[in-house]
Image (cartoon, grey):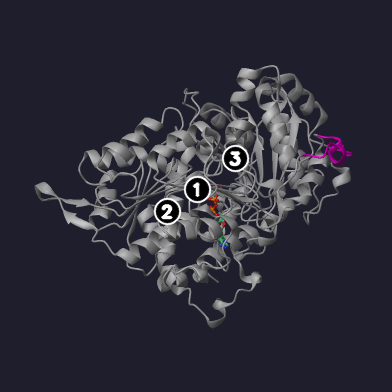
Amino acid sequence: MTWADEATELTRNPTHPFRRTRQKYIPPSLRQTYKSNGVTNLNSTRPPSFNFSTESAPSFNSSFNSHQHRGSSPPLGRGRGCGRGRNSYGAASNPSQNATSYNIKFEQLELKQDDDSTDNNNVNAINFDAYEDIPVEASGSEIPEPVTSFDEIDLGEALNRNIKRCKYVKPTPVQRHAIPIAVAGRDLMACAQTGSGKTAAFCFPIICGILRDRFKQVRTGGGGFRVAYPTALILSPTRELSCQIHEEATKFAYKTGLKVAVAYGGAPIAEQFRNLEKGVDILVATPGRLMDMIQRAGVSLKMIKYLALDEADRMLDMGFEQQIRKIVEQMGMPPPGSRQTMLFSATFPDDIQRLASDFLSNYIFLTVGKVGSSTDLIAQRVELVQDMDKRSHLMNLLCAQKTIGQPALTLVFVETKRGADALEHWLCMNGLPAIAIHGDKVQRERERALKSFKSGMTPILVATDVASRGLDIPCVAHVINFDMPKGIDVYVHRIGRTGRAGNSGLATAFFSDKNLPLAKPLVDLMQEAKQEVPSWLSKYAENSFGDSGRASRYGRSKFGGSDFRTSLQSWGDNYHRPRTNGDENSVIDSYDPASSEVGYATPAPGSTEYYATAYADYHALADVDSYATSSREYGYGHESIVASGWD
Ligand SMILES: Nc1ncnc2c1ncn2[C@@H]1O[C@H](COP(=O)(O)OP(=O)(O)OP(=O)(O)O)[C@@H](O)[C@H]1O
């Protein structure tokens, strides 16, 4: 079993030896209904009711038994985070150590003869059928042809071996189109759905390009200390995403001789400098830490030949554009044309495209799938819930998941850091194993929260938008928008944490009166994704139409489903060349009202049974059936209510 399989297995397999000794978690409200064998009669389970003012926190002394088999005596968590003190996975990890241990495990992954097989069964659990009819459009001059297999592109022997090690048997649609474009040396602005494999789409061409050219990476700088001269720079908006890309790129570059390093805030800079001094070909970084390193003369961008911006629209968003512009235009990086630039995201508003075009030269604009949605892979439910009822609604929902015996990783998005802390606290006080992640937590706490969530130890993660983009966490079966985001693009990225790699997922949104400006774009998005739109939401959408200012700001037109250049002027015939996979019908047509006349039939929306039914359809991603829980003292000291998301 590979290291990757092992991690997945741990989360999915209820009989995994590591999981088996854990005590089953039973929400307090349902303890009467649970039989000793864990089987619950759903019909006899009434939705729990919570009296927030009077309900006392349940105690879970026995819940820590789960740790005893590992010989540790877990302390009752002091401070924030249910998972704190229970996480037996060790201290927060250092990314460079991570990379080393991954490499060791990766090495153990021996390539067998049948790894050459293109058998779909071996495809790293990706569901390629879900991508069969995906619409693709590319615009620009002389667009390289897409491929249907990795073998059709000359990626080099070492990279091909690693692709097989990763069990990537065939390219996803965005990879089919983007990799040939990038390998041909073209600049690219690519827009593809969440979870569709964009990381590999920019990593493979970079690795293959560097291997082809073999630049010398480390030069001695002035003043006697070493300056790192990376050949490729991959920028991403958050620390966690940078670490994730670093891990992926390290796997892809395994045994190629290329060095991949990561630099991000919140971790000791000296250690990161030491890593860079050993040489770096590909540097993955968050903008703030990179600027710092450049200003301290530890990194030079003079030799950059490849620049990739993941979540590019976020990187060029209001407030952040200046920092990126400074890095790309004023810190010695070769200009467009002398370097290759690739911008990737699932959303690309027109105004951001316009900004981004400054960084590009004769680029190709590529859209794969309906921009800003994961089509029908993610079942989207929207509930009308006023603020004061949100917590009890959430509790019903989480308990309903448990009642069908399929608790799985659930990501709950809130708007503010303080809101995240408060909800985490409340859930824990009510016996649900939750942990929060947001920008006010120190990096070790953030890493611990993510690790605890990923492992299934704390299966509810309460997060601000710091976790909304890019994170690829297997087995997230349910994303709950407890607070709706301000913009529809953020909603798209948030729900994209489930339903990844062609698998299905469930997303539930709590919509309240104050989210009115979001109604129209949300309805449009749901219709495009062939989701049932509640009639009340359609009415809200009609009403919000008149609110042209806000509605259009959040509106679909800004999503960036098309190349903004085509609306500026008419291009020559050779410039704009839409691709539709040869099947015009494959483009998702507009919503058919007849087939979606709302009717969340019985059971009633919002009821426990309703969620249990809905959830049952989408739990397939995770079979976590047991987890520990705890109550713990709560260190609550943050007053900041600023929403987070940028590091
Ligand atoms: N060709 C492939 N075959 C099998 N699995 C793949 C392939 N390409 C990517 N994957 C897997 O699909 C998952 C999603 O990929 P990735 O994180 O790159 O998506 P993304 O498009 O960047 O998502 P987001 O928009 O959320 O950032 C990952 O677990 C990755 O390992």
Mark before the other along the chain sequence, 1 or 2: 1
Task: Indicate the amino acid at tag 2.
Answer: Arg
Q: Residue 614: x and y, percent?
A: 79, 45
Q: Is mark 2 within 8 Å of ligand 1?
A: no
Quadrant placement of the N terminus: bottom right
Give whichever of 560, 579 is nearer the camera.
Answer: 579
Give whichever of 186, 261 is nearer the camera.
Answer: 186
Q: Quadrant of residue 17?
A: bottom right
Q: Quadrant of ligand 1?
A: bottom right
Magenta stretch, residue numbers: 591-605
Decide whether residue 597 is among the magenta residues.
yes
Which disc, if any, is residue 140?
1
Give whichever of 225, 343 is nearer the camera.
Answer: 343
Decide whether residue 419 is among the magenta residues.
no
| Circles 1 and 2 in contact, beta carbons < 8 Å | yes
Mark before the other along the chain sequence, 2 or 3: 2
Rate crowding at label 3 as few (under 14), some (14 to 19) or many (20 or more) other CA atoms within 10 Å: many
The answer to whether residue 28 is visible is: no
Task: Indicate the amino acid at tag 1.
Answer: Gly
Q: Give the SS element for disc 3.
A: loop
